[in-house]
Image: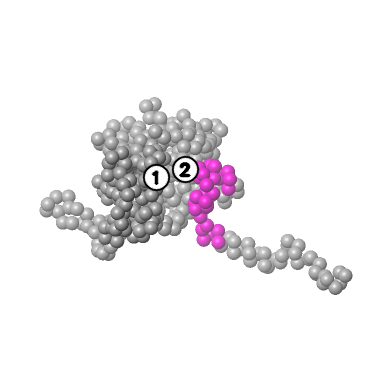
């Protein structure tokens, strides 16, 4: 390691337990960590970098920052017209999963972001009480940033992105009695979104964006166009008589300046698109025993969390969180009902808008009544005997008898 190298061969040196490499590109000295404590591996990396300089394909990536990676990531979002991209009050693009990355990786060079730093990010996010799936979405966004830079030629190497084990799929769904009770309890303007969720297995965003021009009530169908769905796939949804009657009733109350099927009346009596109804949903579910409010607890210390006081003299109040049925459980309910109604899984998957069978199966929930029905059928099978014909089959002959 201490031997003097010939001019143009670069050199290897050690900082702590890690080897670094030094070489020149277009007269500029470049020093970079080899990311290894093995001198042979460091020498191999140095030879590769020198080969890139010789072939004039080496690029100095030391000035590539996290911010530049994020900028190109947002440009990719905009160029492809992906809907989740929002904008803040200043008009800048904003995504929750990227905002979490900003807090941790801001100011870092791309070369500094490695598997160890990503693991520290994961630990930081877990300390904030975030779920594994939420953390994984941020890491996936970071991985996409690096892949874009690699495809553009800005970076040549992409680090390893350690992911967390995802949580088990949610199992919630509505039984018919629960759906009917909630339908009677919710405000009138939410009865239609509730029915659309249960009968069509559509997503909440698709339901609230549904316009009158998309439906053909005489044919008993409604259409979701490409660009209006989460995966940009157009699809036609059948309308059962109960749902069609609700839509026809709602149509009689529509106002010309509101194109949305799911609307409410504001304080001036104008029809406006239904927005967030989280508080109304949670309060009704708690009242019906479909949910509960619990004190929020710090995931690290286990201490009860308090909401910030509204004014200096106010006493701090315990921060409460909702646990129970959510609107997305209606999507599971719709998928389950489609399958149990005898609709083929292929058709049901097309109606619900699931692109893969694996994701579809996560929504096709088995309930206790399904298990009870299987038990009843199995009991009848054993009581009546095997009617498949296997019991009446002739006994197998031995080889000796055959011969």
- Which residue, given by chain and number where applicable, does mark 2 sit on? 202
Secondary structure at numbered mark 1 = helix
Around disc 1, counting alpha carbons within 10 Å, would you say few (fewer than 14), some (14 to 19), or many (20 or more)?
few
- In the rendered image, the quadrant that contains the C terminus is bottom right
Vertical order, 397 against 149 (above or below) = below
The residue shown at (31%, 35%) is: 266
Q: Position of residue 19 (x, y in %)?
A: 31, 56
Report if residue 351 is visible in the image: yes
Q: Position of residue 107 (x, y in %)?
A: 25, 46
The residue shown at (31%, 39%) is: 26
Secondary structure at numbered mark 2 = loop
Real-space CA distance between mark 1 and mark 2, rounded to the nearest whole angstrom: 55 Å
The residue shown at (37%, 27%) is: 257
- Which residue, given by chain and number where applicable, does mark 1 sit on? 51
* Magenta: main secondary structure: helix
Part of the protein shown in magenta: 345-371
Q: Is residue 148 magenta?
A: no
Front residue of this view, candidates 246 and 369:
369
- In the rendered image, the quadrant that contains the N terminus is bottom left
Q: Is residue 369 magenta?
A: yes
Tag 1 and tag 2, C-beta contact below 8 Å: no
Which image quarter: residue 38? Answer: bottom left
The residue shown at (56%, 62%) is: 372
Of badges 1 and 2, the one in the foreground is: 1
Numbered badge on residue 130: none
Tell me: 356 left or right of 97. right
Q: Earlier in the sequence, mark 1 or mark 2?
A: 1
């Amino acid at each position: 390691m201490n031997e003097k190298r010939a001019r143009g061969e670069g050199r290897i040196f050690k900082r702590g337990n890690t080897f670094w490499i030094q070489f020149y590109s277009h007269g500029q000295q470049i020093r970079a960590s080899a990311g290894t404590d093995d001198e042979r591996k460091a020498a191999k990396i140095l030879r590769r970098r020198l080969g890139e300089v010789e072939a004039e394909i080496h690029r100095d990536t030391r000035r590539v920052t996290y911010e530049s990676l994020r900028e190109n990531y947002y440009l990719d979002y905009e160029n492809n017209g992906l809907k989740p991209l929002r904008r803040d009050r200043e008009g800048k693009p904003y995504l929750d999963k990227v905002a979490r990355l900003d807090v941790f990786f801001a100011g870092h060079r791309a070369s500094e972001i490695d598997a160890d730093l990503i693991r520290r990010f994961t630990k930081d996010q877990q300390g904030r009480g975030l779920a594994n799936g939420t953390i994984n979405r941020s890491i996936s966004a970071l991985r996409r940033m690096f892949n874009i830079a690699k495809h553009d030629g800005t970076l040549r190497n992409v680090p390893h992105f350690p992911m967390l084990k995802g949580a088990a799929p949610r199992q919630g769904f509505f039984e018919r009695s629960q759906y009917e009770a909630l339908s009677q309890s919710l405000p009138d303007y939410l009865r239609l979104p509730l029915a659309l969720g249960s009968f069509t297995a559509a997503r909440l965003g698709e339901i609230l964006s549904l316009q009158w021009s998309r439906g053909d009530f005489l044919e008993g169908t409604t259409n979701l166009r490409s660009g209006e769905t989460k995966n940009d796939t157009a699809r036609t949804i059948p309308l059962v008589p109960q749902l069609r009657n609700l839509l026809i009733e709602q149509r009689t109350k529509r106002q010309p300046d509101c194109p949305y099927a799911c609307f409410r009346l504001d304080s001036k009596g104008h029809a406006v698109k239904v927005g967030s109804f989280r508080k109304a949903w949670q309060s009704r579910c708690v009242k019906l025993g479909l949910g509960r409010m619990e004190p929020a607890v710090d995931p690290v210390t286990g201490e009860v969390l308090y909401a910030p006081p509204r004014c200096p003299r106010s006493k701090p109040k315990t921060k409460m969180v909702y646990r129970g049925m959510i609107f997305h459980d209606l999507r599971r309910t719709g998928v389950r009902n489609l399958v149990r109604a005898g609709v083929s899984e292929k058709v049901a998957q097309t109606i619900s808008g699931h692109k893969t069978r694996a994701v579809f199966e996560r929504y096709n929930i088995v309930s206790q009544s399904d298990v009870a029905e299987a038990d009843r059928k199995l009991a009848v099978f054993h009581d009546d005997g095997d009617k498949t014909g296997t019991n009446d089959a002739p006994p197998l002959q031995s080889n000796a008898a055959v011969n």
